[in-house]
Every structure is written in structure tokens, then in C-alpha cells.
Amino acid sequence: MSFSSDVKKELIMMESDHEAMKAELAAIIRMNGLISTNGQDTSLDIQTESAAIARRIYTLLRNVFPGPIEIVVRKKMRLKKNNIYIVRLREKVNELLENLEIEHEDDGFEQTNLLETLSTDEMRRAYLRGAFIARGSINNPETSSYHLEIFNLDQDHNHILCQLMNMYSLRAKELQRRNGYIVYMKEANRIADFLRLIGANKALFKFEDARIVRDMRNSVNRIVNCETANLNKTISASVRQVENIKFIERTVGLDYLPERLREIAKVRLEHPDVTLQELGKLIPSGELSKSGVNHRLKKIEEIARSLQS
């Protein structure tokens, strides 16, 4: 089961008061509802590929709608052969839409004053919860980059959802896709805030645990990479220093060097693998600082270059 499915499974088990149920149901209808008209008869289909979500929709309708409700199951023939669950209303559709303050136009649904309709914090949270249940998705934080999105066919509704999310400082953004629109977030902190906002507390804990492990792993990798780079740099410098000293030894002899340089040259030849700091502690005439060791080795390198030219 995907992380998105885990989140939705938790959300559809939540208990809500009457007004929150209406807000959640309104969001689901806006995003997954389809009105059909045959003469004077109007029907509403709310479609989902999840049996659990279909049960949630049925429960929400039962609590806010007095009319008869059907559940139709169809087999999806293209690509994945999943079932499609349709929660269908054949009567009193206009009464339901009026109760939810949803208007129906020829080109879809409309909620002119949606942000005003969602007058309480609980209703706003419930609406966002319904939107995520209907068409939301979130990447598994253990395996991929942080990303949460809600897909919309309606650009205006997508914009309203973005506004609603940003009322909670979530920094949500909008983007047009080839077949619709999305409102999305990529910041881990904001995604965690959104999960907390809609009441997905178990998913939030799982998200935060995965985030901590992932951030720690990234931190360890950075440290290891840094240490590896430093080690490679140290080894390369040591090899170059030994080559310079051996070149001087072959061409003019180490006695050509001043006493202080000759001393450190001999120690470096005896200990080619130690760091500059460790090398400074091995000087017979007295301990030398790392910068002092580096200075003398650079002098030796300059001499080797002058002999090569």
C-alpha cells in the first residue's frame, strides 16, 4: 500500500461533526462529482477507485442527505483492471447541492463564495481533507523527494484550494498539467503541517520518522564524502611531497637543502602516510605546528621546481 493510501485510510476513519461532514463532502463532490440530466431528472455520480472511500462518501451522504443512495460497481477495462465505485443519487440532487452551497452550471460546479462559506477553522480543515481524499497524493518520504499535490480539473477551484491552503501559511503553489491543474508543496515542513492540519496524525508521525532518518542519512553521507575528499587531498599532497624530496635526493642530494628543510624532508620520507599535524610531532629538533610543516614542505616544492626548470 502506498503512503498516499495510508494517509487516506486514516482520514476516512475520522469522526466529524455535521458541518465538517458537509464541508468534506462538498470538496469530494466538487472534485469527483458528475451531474447527468435526462429531461426533468437529474442524477449525481461520485466516482472513486477505492471501496473504502466509496463507503466514506456513502456515510457522509447518509448524515447530510435524506434521499436514496446507490453504490454501483464497474470493472475498469483500460490498463489496470480495478473496480470503479460510483456513489449515485437519482433524487433530490438539487436539494443536496443547495444544502452544500454548490451551484451547478453546464460546464461544471461552482462555489462563488467558497472561502466565506467555510466560515470556521474546522470546516476549512474538513474541506482540505475531502480534497485530499478525492484527488490528493503524497510521495513516500522514505524513497523519493518530498512532494504533495492535489489534482483538479477546474482551474478556478484549483486556485481557491491554493488560497485556502495558504491561509495556513503552507506556501502552496499552482501548476498547470497537460490534463488539468495541481496545487502542490515540496517543503517537508509544510507537508508535515498539512498532514497535521487535515488530521492525519499517524501518517504525520510516520512522515516525520522517515524524514529524521533520511536527513540523518544525508548528513552522514555529507560527512563521509567530506572526510573522503579530505583524505584524498591529504594522500595526493603526501605523494607529491615525497616525489619532490626524492627528486631532490636523486639530482643534488638532500644535503643541498637547508638544515630545517632537510630535517623535515627525511621525516616525510620515513612517514609518507601521516598528516601534517602528525608530521610536526615527529620533528627531532622539536614539535612544529601544522602551518610550520606546510610552509617548509612548500619551500621544498619550490626548490624541486627550480631544479626541474
Image (tube, rainbow, N blue to C red):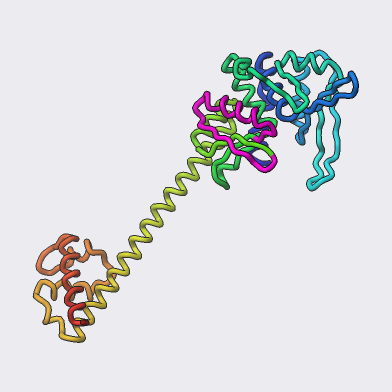
Q: Quarter of the image containing the C terminus?
A: bottom left
Q: Viewed as shown, does residue 117 lie left or right of 241?
A: right
Q: Could one spot residue 9 in this view of the protein?
A: no
Is 208 a magenta residue? Answer: no
Q: Viewed as shown, does residue 185 lie left or right of 89?
A: left
Q: Which residue is outermost to the right? A: 39
Where residue 144 appears, as percent x and y from the top left, is 57, 47
Q: Could one spot residue 189 in this view of the protein?
A: yes
Residue 164 location, quadrant:
top right
Where residue 160 appears, as percent x and y from the top left, is 61, 26
Please state which of residues 148 and 140 is positioned toward the viewer in this rendering.
Answer: 148
Q: Residue visible at 86% across and 30% down?
A: 72
Where residue 109 appears, as percent x and y from the top left, is 73, 24
Where residue 247 appears, as percent x and y from the top left, is 23, 82
Please state which of residues 213 and 126 is positioned toward the viewer in this rendering.
Answer: 126
Q: Which residues are magenta?
A: 151-179
Q: Viewed as shown, does residue 252 lie left or right of 96?
A: left
Residue 129 location, quadrant:
top right
Q: Which residue is outermost to the bottom? A: 251
Q: Residue visible at 15% across and 84% down?
A: 253
Q: Viewed as shown, does residue 39 lie left or right of 292?
A: right
Q: How many marks?
A: 0
Query: Would you place residue 197 above or below residue 307 in this image?
Result: above
Q: Which residue is outermost to the front? A: 106
Please state which of residues 88 and 199 is positioned toward the viewer in this rendering.
Answer: 88
Q: Quarter of the image containing the N terminus?
A: top right
Please state which of residues 263 and 252 is positioned toward the viewer in this rendering.
Answer: 252
Query: Would you place residue 85 above or below residue 115 in this image?
Result: below
Is 178 a magenta residue? Answer: yes
